[in-house]
Image: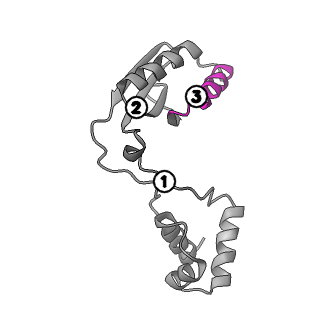
Amino acid sequence: MDDIDIKILRHLQKDSRVPAAELAELVGCSRTVCWRRIKSMEDAGIIQSHVTLLNREKLDLGVTVFVNVKTSDHDPDWLTQFAQVVNKFPEITEFYRMSGDVDYLLKVVVPDIASYDNFYRRLIQSINLSDVSSNFAMEEIKFTTALPL
C-alpha cells in the first residue's frame, strides 16, 4: 500500500459512493488506475464490504447496552457454541473476547429497556453464563466506522 491507496481508503471511508472519476481526481491518478487499486484492495480483503450506515434513533433503536459476560467454561467448544448463540441475536451488533476481569463483551442495540429485558431473558436461556452485567450508554459522544489511516 502506498500514499494513493491510503488516500483512496480515506475518501471511501467518508463516502463509498463517490464516483470513480471524482475519486481518481481527489487522489491524483487516472480513473482506470483508481478502479484497479480499489479492486486490488477488495481482492486482498482490505476493503471488506460496502455498507450503508443507518440512523439508530430514526429507526427506534436508540438504546445501546454494553453487556459484560463472565463464564467459568473456557473450552473452545463452548466458545463455538456461544458464538453460534450470539449470531442468532440481531440485537448484538458487536462481540469481543476480552482480557481482564470480563471474558466477553457484547454491544447490544434495542429500542428500549423492556426490549433489552426480553433480549436478556432469551440470551440467558440460550447458554449457561456465570455472570452477566449490563451498562447502558447514556449518550453517544463519538461514533465512527473510519479507521485511523
Percent x, y of residue 85: 61, 24
* Residue 84 magenta-highlighted: yes
Look at the image and tell me whether residue 80 can be seen: yes
- Categorize mark 1 by other alpha carbons within 10 Å: few (<14), some (14-19), many (20+): few
Magenta-tinted stretch: 77-91
Q: Could you say whether the residue bearing mark 1 is in a helix, strand or loop?
A: loop
Pick the front one: 4 or 34 = 34
Q: Mark 3 vs mark 1: which is more N-terminal?
A: 1
Percent x, y of residue 125: 55, 13
Q: Could you say whether the residue bearing mark 3 is in a helix, strand or loop?
A: helix
How far apart are the alpha carbons under marks 2 and 3?
14 Å
Identify the residue position indicated by label 3 in the image: 86
Residue 53 numbered tag = 1
Judge depth for marks 3 and 1 and give the one in front: 1
Say whether residue 113 is left or right of residue 130: left
Identify the residue position indicated by label 2 in the image: 66
* Res 42 → quadrant: bottom right
Look at the image and tell me whether residue 127 can be seen: no
Percent x, y of residue 2: 57, 74
Q: Mark 2 vs mark 1: which is more N-terminal?
A: 1
- Categorize mark 3 by other alpha carbons within 10 Å: few (<14), some (14-19), many (20+): some
The type of residue carrying mark 1 is Leu
How far apart are the alpha carbons under marks 3 and 1?
22 Å
Q: Residue at x 27, y 36 (%)?
A: 138
* Res 46 → quadrant: bottom right
Does residue 36 lie above or below 43 as drawn? below
* Residue 24 magenta-highlighted: no
Q: Could you say whether the residue bearing mark 2 is in a helix, strand or loop?
A: strand
Quarter holding the N terminus is: bottom right
Pick the front one: 69 or 136 = 136
Percent x, y of residue 48: 63, 56
Q: Mark 2 vs mark 3: which is more N-terminal?
A: 2
